[in-house]
Image (tube, rainbow, N blue to C red):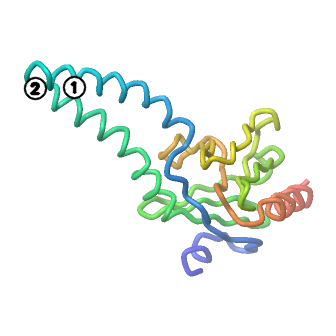
Amino acid sequence: MDRIDADLVPGERLLWSGKPQRIPLLVKNDLILLPAVLVIGGVILGGVRNGFSPLLWGVLMLVGGVWLGRPVLRYAALRTASYGITDRRVIVWTNGKDAVAHYLTDLGPPYVRENPDGTGTVCFNLAPADFVQTTGRGWVDQSWSDVGLDPKYPELLNIEHPMVVRDLIASAQQGDR
């Protein structure tokens, strides 16, 4: 709470704070790399049959590092993320970075995508059709540039009670207008 209070401007009230409750291992964007892994696997299989060159090992390590590194980096970034809603701003904190704040008056209406487990994501400035529902198989559409945590508009990923938070934000936006 000290970090949250330190980032508030004079006269600003904290309405809600939270953090991601669920951090998925794989997201939809990770599937793009799957064909590359399969092709590289075929090349490596051919290389094993005809003698394995160091170049193939290097390619294998590069593709494997990228494919396995993305979920690890995403997990590390989301594990340290926390969010705050004030009567004026939406604030996203991540460990090792400064807080990123967006004034409610600069944001469009909040939208919610609920997950099967009751958590959900609150986003701004998107049409409801831009949200793709989760499939129930553990694949979750995420943003934050997958790992960068610096979106153009804030996203509160995988929070508890997302509909309540959305309503709180909408009420705060109405109070500012």
Q: Residue at x 53, y 62 (%)?
A: 81
Determine whether, in the image, residue 148 is placed left or right of residue 51: right
Residue 12, quarter of picture = bottom right
Q: Nearer the viewer, residue 138 or 18?
A: 138
Using the image, determine if residue 160 lies above or below residue 1.
above
Q: Secondary structure at mark 2?
A: loop
Few, some or many residues within 10 Å of mark 1 (<14, 14–19, 20+): some
Q: Which residue does the numbered mark 2 point to in the structure image?
A: 52
Q: Which mark is residue 44?
A: 1
Residue at 73% over, 52% down: 122
**Residue 97 x %, y %:** 45, 59
Residue type highlighted by circle 1:
Ile
In the rendered view, does 74 fall on the left or right side of 166?
left
The image position of residue 100, as x and y in percent, is: 57, 55
From what the image shows, is residue 135 above or below residue 56?
below
Nearer to me, 72 or 14: 72
